[in-house]
Image (tube, rainbow, N blue to C red):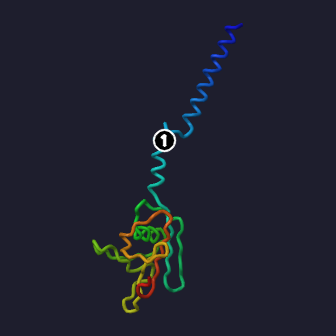
């Protein structure tokens, strides 16, 4: 009888050891952070931003929660949104100076009227070209067709 009790206790300890070991393998710990790391890194390789287009004629369109690759530029955001929403986008690449937006939709820059497409990020007038300005997660970009450069 004592032998049977010892065997039952030994089996119970053995089974409990497997159960506890299995639970530790499933829970986050220092030992398995490397396993979880690739998923966390993939999540950090994209950003989510918002865009507003003000056509200067009372028409305003907003695009929320746009996903982009980390370090994407403002111009990349504009390209993606216009492409996905069948809006015309005309621009000219000036090499090192960057890309100049000439028109969005049917609204093109007007030298005679002194109205141009200009952009702000988080309510701050941008001081560099749209192809050079790198976005961060949560940024809000506004493109406005307005007179002169208002800061």
Q: Residue at x 53, y 82 (%)?
A: 59
Q: Position of residue 118 (x, y in %)?
A: 42, 80
Residue 118's place in the image compared with 134, above or below, is below
Which of the image's four quarters has the N terminus? top right
The answer to which quarter of the image holds residue 98 is bottom left
Which of the image's four quarters has the C terminus? bottom left
Question: Seen from this angle, which residue lies furthest left?
Answer: 95
Q: Residue at x 47, y 40 (%)?
A: 35
Q: Residue at x 63, y 16 (%)?
A: 10
Question: Seen from this angle, which residue lies furthest right?
Answer: 1
Query: In the shown orientation, is residue 114 left or right of residue 23?
Result: left
Q: How many marks?
A: 1
Q: Residues within 10 Å of mark 1 (few under 14, many from 20)?
A: few
Q: Position of residue 119 (x, y in %)?
A: 44, 77
Q: Position of residue 43 (x, y in %)?
A: 48, 53
Depth order, front residue of 55/25 = 25
Q: Position of residue 128 (x, y in %)?
A: 36, 74
Q: Which residue is mark 1?
A: 33
Residue 57's place in the image compared with 42, above or below, is below
The answer to which quarter of the image holds residue 126 is bottom left
Question: Seen from this angle, which residue lies furthest bottom?
Answer: 112
Secondary-structure class at tag 1 = helix
Depth order, front residue of 20/77 = 20
């Amino acid at each position: 009888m004592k032998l049977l009790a010892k065997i039952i206790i030994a089996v119970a300890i053995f089974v409990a050891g497997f159960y506890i070991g299995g639970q530790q393998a499933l829970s986050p710990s220092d030992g398995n952070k490397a396993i979880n790391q690739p998923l966390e890194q993939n999540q950090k390789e994209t950003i989510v931003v918002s865009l507003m287009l003000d056509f200067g004629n009372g028409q305003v369109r907003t695009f929320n929660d746009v996903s982009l690759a980390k370090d994407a530029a403002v111009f990349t955001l504009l390209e993606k949104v216009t492409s996905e929403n069948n809006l015309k986008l005309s621009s000219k690449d000036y090499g090192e100076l960057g890309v100049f937006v000439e028109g969005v939709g049917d609204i093109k820059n007007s030298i005679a009227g002194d109205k141009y497409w200009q952009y702000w990020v988080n309510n701050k007038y941008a001081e560099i070209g749209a192809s050079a300005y790198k976005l961060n997660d949560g940024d809000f970009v506004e493109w406005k067709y307005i007179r002169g450069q208002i800061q």
